[in-house]
Image: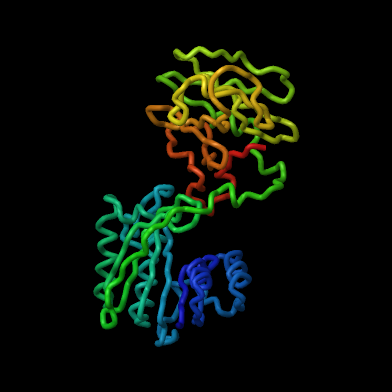
Amino acid sequence: MKVLSLFSGIGAFEKALDNLQIPYELAGFSEIDKYAVKSYCAIHGVDESMNLGDITKIDEKALPKDIDLITYGFPCQDISLAGKQKGMFNDDGTQTRSGLFFEALRIIEATKPKIAIAENVKNLTGKKFKEQFELVLKSLEEAGYSNYWKVLNAKDYGIPQNRERVFIISIRKDIDKGYEFPNPFPLQLRLKDMLDAEVDEKFYLSNKGVNGLLNAFVDGREHKPNLMTNETEYSPTIDTLVGSQTHRSPYIDESSDKIELIQVGQMYGTEREPNPSGGRVYDSDGLMRSLGAGHGMPQPIVMVREATKKGYAEAEVGDSVNISQPNSKTRRGRVGKQVSQTLTTSGGNEMAVVVDE
């Protein structure tokens, strides 16, 4: 099988073929980011001379005519909820980066591969871009392809990441026999299973970075947790009253700027533990400091601020927390339950994981 890779990145489609043990011959790949090119070549064992470079400068007439598969995850910056959502076209009618889809279409029309697979953000299928998504499908159909599309989530297919993407499978009409997307299956691998045992202290949140993140609104009132540092020998007052008490005091270990988000107070009911006395007090070793009659020893919980009616989300050990814009009062969906939230290429400091060190 001969494969042409467009908008290649580090070659995720090609890696999938490797994982599935499907042999293929690479006709070429197209990538403009120099670091991605180096990574691609190192991962797939190919020379940089295989890179066709800027897709707008590819001469489609010079490409092989016996390509079986074209993969193209065209840019999502102008479609994604994280971007400005201009869509594929600027106000003056010129193409945006996401409009580079039409460059991929140009190459598909010229080479007529048996199959073309596109990937993009879920928002492409939403109400805002409905017409543009229909244009994508119509353009591929006019090029001679039957289209099958579906929004898939990585966590339903073995990857501990909450990542929804639309996939478009375009099969040349003269060989089309239909297509069905694979069924999801239970996630066996958890985010915590992928964490390193030893982590450099520079990767822990700073005290400043965590303050705004842990503020939450409870019953319409802003709740600011009392932070106990390693220089404090005692916890803020903890009682066993129910009522409107909201004693949740994360233990903050400031040594070497290292943050340990350890729950040291939970004296009211939660969705996970409805009995208000079920929450207990933990030290940095995860041991109970305050003893009393009641229940066992649930895992520590971190209350993370969210712009919802509830005001917060509960993050347990092994959960991910989106820490971008920690002081925002409008963010929601920060906590990923045993999976990572969608990873981006915009930095690397946007995601944290709750650990029980």
Query: At which x and y percent is residue 277?
Result: 51, 19
State whether residue 31 appears in this view.
Answer: no
Q: Nearer the viewer, residue 100 or 93?
A: 100
Residue 281 against residue 11 in the figure, above or below: above
Q: Residue at x 28, y 78 (%)?
A: 176
The image quadrant where one finds the C terminus is: top right
**Number of marks:** 0
Name the one closer to the observer, 182 or 255: 182
- Closest to the observer: 185 or 157? 185
Locate the N terminus by quadrant: bottom left
Residue visible at 75% across and 35% down in the picture:
256
- Can you give x and y, in whole percent of width and height, for residue 349 in the image? 59, 45
Q: Residue at x 43, y 65 (%)?
A: 73
* Residue at the image point whose x is 63% and y is 16% from the top: 236
Q: Is residue 18 above or below residue 124?
A: below
Q: Quadrant of residue 282?
A: top right
Foreground residue among 31 and 234: 234
> What colouring method underlies this structural image?
rainbow
Q: Position of residue 307 (x, y in %)?
A: 42, 31
Relative height, residue 309 to residue 349 (above, below): above
Q: Position of residue 322 (x, y in %)?
A: 52, 41
* Residue 11 in sight: yes
